[in-house]
Structure formats: C-alpha cells, structure tokens
Amino acid sequence: MNRRLDPDPRRLPRHVACVMDGNGRWAQSRGLARTEGHTAGEDALIDTVEGAADIGLEWLTVYAFSTENWRRPPSEVRFLMGFNESLLERRSRELHEKNVRIRFVGRRDSRVPRRTQTRIDEAIELTGNNTGLTFTVAFNYGGRAEIVDAAAALIRDGVSAADVDEAALVRRLYDPEMPDVDLVIRTSGEHRVSNFLLWHMAYSELVFTDTLWPDFRRGDLYNAICTYQARDRRFGGLNC
C-alpha cells in the first residue's frame, strides 16, 4: 500500500462501490487454493467497511457474487455460498454494533441456498434501523439483470410507454433508495466494470489499483477517495 492520504471530510463522495478482485491470484501466488484467497479477503472487507464508517461515508457497495460467477467450478461456487453465509453469521452483529446498516441487491432465485437467503434476511432485519454507513452487498447480482428486472416490473405494473421515465425505472430497481455511485474502485489491476451497478455509475469516477483485494485496507480506500477529490466532475457541463 502507498502512503496513506487523508480525505477532506467536507468533500466525501456519497456512494463508493468496490469490485473486490484478485482473491484467486493472491492465493495462487502463494501456492494456495483459490478459496484461501476468498478467506483472506474477509479481513480486507471488514477493515474497508469499518474505515468507511469511521470517516463518515454514507454508502459503500461491494461486488460479492455476480450472476456470471455461477460459471465458476462448482466446488468454488459451493465454497462462496457457504463462506458468505458464514461471514454474515459471524460479522453482522459486529457491524450492527458500529451502527452499520446492511443491505443486499441481486436476484433472489432458487440457485441461492435457502440458508444463505435466511442469513441475508437476518442481517437486513438486525441492522435495518441503524443510521450510520449503509453497506450494500451485491450478491447474485448483474447490472444488466437489474435493468431487465426493472423493465419487467414496469410491464407487470401496467405502466404505459408515455409514463416510462428514469424515475419510474429507478423505483423498480433492486434498492430504489440507493444513490448514484460517485466513485468506483477496482482492485488487482483490471480495468473494466464487469456488469456492476450499470445504472448507478453513469457519471462515476473510476479508480483502478494494482493491489489485490486481500491486501486492500482502509488506507487504500482513503487514497482512492483523495484521487476522486482531486478530479473535476462536470456531469456533461462545464465548471467555469
């Protein structure tokens, strides 16, 4: 990690999203099974969430399992399902005590084990009244799938073509309260968005880091926020 910078608390992004990439490569570079990289990534996740809460960030969303991840070897998929279930069971109360509100976005289909869905519901209920950081987990999530599901909801609700606008579609996204993403961070040196929060990142600033996710910590988050704060955001206009 580079020298840690301190973000200006007066100009924090409202919503930061992270693509947590590089777990497998981290493990393989150490001669370990890929699943060991996912386990090591837990410390990175918790430190990043707590760091976000400590500086007063409002929203943090992480990409935990995509709709494309079902294509991975069945043994790895089974591990990820069990690992995420276990993580929720072990860490939800800890985050609850820090006033973190936990939410999830993604499809609730039959591929997600019933026990995992139960843990998700328990975490949401436990932390639902918290007023600090909103920590959202994108699980069985795809950006295109979310837009397709919202469009299908418009049809089911009988919305006429004349009444379809951005606001109508947003009300049918997985979490209508989720604000647009100001900053997207992707680890491990990859330079793509991978079908993540496509609607919400229309005007996001993108920061890519070579750091593999298990090595990521709050200092890396703060450095990315400082990079964001140094940029000129114009939203298609001019700052004169």
Image (cartoon, rainbow, N blue to C red):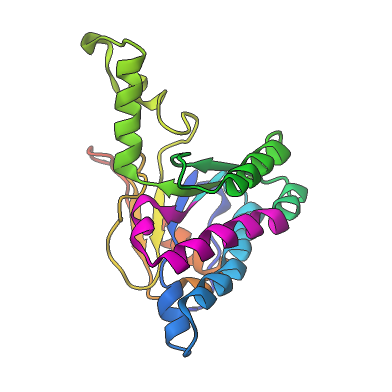
Residue 73 in the figure: left or right of residue 135: left
State left or right for residue 153 relative to residue 10: left
Most extreme residue toward the bottom, as rendered? 31
- Image position of 187 (left or right of 78): left
- Can residue 215 be seen in this snapshot? no
Q: Is residue 104 visible?
A: yes
Q: Does the stretch in magenta take in 63?
A: yes
Measured along the vertical axis of the image, is residue 193 above or below residue 24? Answer: above
Quarter occupied by residue 107: top left
Image position, residue 119 (x, y; %):
65, 46
Image mark count: 0
Q: Residue at x 57, y 74 (%)?
A: 40
Residue at image point 31% right, 24% down = 152
Q: Is residue 189 above or below residue 180?
A: below
The residue positioned 57% from the left and 41% from the top of the image is: 103
Q: Is residue 64 magenta?
A: yes
| Magenta span | 62-91
Residue 146 placement (x, y as % from top left)? 35, 37
Query: What quarter of the picture does the C terminus occupy?
Result: top left
Q: Residue at x 73, y 47 (%)?
A: 96
* Percent of width and height locating residue 83: 58, 62
Relative to 66, say whether 180 is above or below. Answer: above
Residue 187 x/y as whole percent: 40, 68
Residue nearer the viewer, 222 or 168: 168
Please identify the dominant SS of the magenta region: helix
Foreground: 170 or 30? 30
